[in-house]
Amino acid sequence: MSRKTVIVVNAVILALEVIALIHDIYAFGTGLFVWYTVDSNVLQLVVSALVLYFVLNGKQIPEGVTKMHFVSAVGLTVTFLIAAFVLAPEGGIKYYFLSDVAPINHFIGPLLSVISLVFLEKTNKLPIRTVILPALVTLIYGIICLILNGLGVIDGPYFFLKINEVAAGVIIMWFAIIAVLCVGFSLLYYIAKWRKRG
């Protein structure tokens, strides 16, 4: 793909993510980062800004930025899946996909992130162990949230993180499901990105 396409797509991502972040700051205040969705979208904002910087300056996208993009793309994919198949059936499709900046956070952001990572950005091939990175980052997020829930600092924000209210088996099950999703999609994107490369 052309350099221009990378620039256009990441400029669109950056603009949309800035809009979403401004809305989320207004909606959640200082507590916005407890949401995995927000964290994944903010990380994608940073990634797209870095991709634009390096591409516009004719530089190779660093390995660290591509690793960050794997984390954000997989995180956004998991966000989409959880919203579509777990949260929306209970809370409504309108709320999770059509209201306010939900289309950016739950659908447009994930879609453009994956397209840019897999099909547009020219990067050096990363080690195969990269596929476990999104799962590790997500696990760290989950553990921190469990601790904060246990201490009464936060409530949720997702039902399976409420350690004082939910059975241990439920928590373990959801951690396992999300870990499998993270590794599975990370591997899928890894293969798709470098399937024709050595």
Image: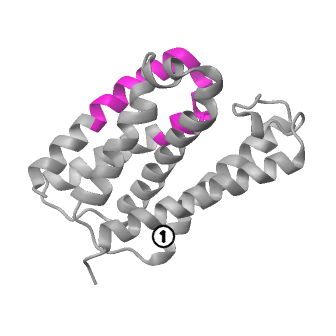
Seen from the viewer's position, the closer of residues 34 and 86 is 86
Q: In the image, is 27 to the left or to the right of 172? A: left
**Mark 1, other Cα within 10 Å: few <14 / some 14–19 / many ≥20:** some
Q: Position of residue 21 (x, y in %)?
A: 43, 27
User: Considering depth in this image, is 30 or 14 the residue closer to the camera?
Assistant: 14
Q: Is residue 39 left or right of residue 34?
A: left
Which residue is drawn at the image coordinates 49% and 22% (left, top)?
24
Q: As displayed, is residue 65 above or below residue 108?
A: below
Residue type of the residue flagged with mark 1: Thr
Residue 134: percent from left, percent from top: 54, 58
Q: Tag 1's secondary structure?
A: helix
How many marks the image carries: the answer is 1
Q: Relative to 42, is 24 above or below?
A: above
Quadrant of the frame with the N terminus: bottom left
Residue 36 in magenta stretch: yes
Image coordinates for residue 76, horizontal then vertical, percent: 47, 44
Residue at the image position 71 percent from the left and 57 percent from the top: 176
Question: x, y (%) of residue 49?
Answer: 29, 44
Look at mark 1 in the image and give the residue it sits on: 130
Q: Is residue 49 left or right of residue 175?
A: left
**Location of residue 37 with respect to 140 vertically, above or below:** above
**Placement of 39 over or under 93, stated as above or below:** below
Q: Main secondary structure of the magenta part?
A: helix
What residue lies at 35% left-to-right and 28% top-to-bottom? Answer: 18
Residue positioned most to the bottom: 198
Residue interval drawn in magenta = 13-40
**Which of the pair 30/1 is nearer the observer?**
1
Query: Which of the 4 image quadrants contains residue 87?
Result: top right
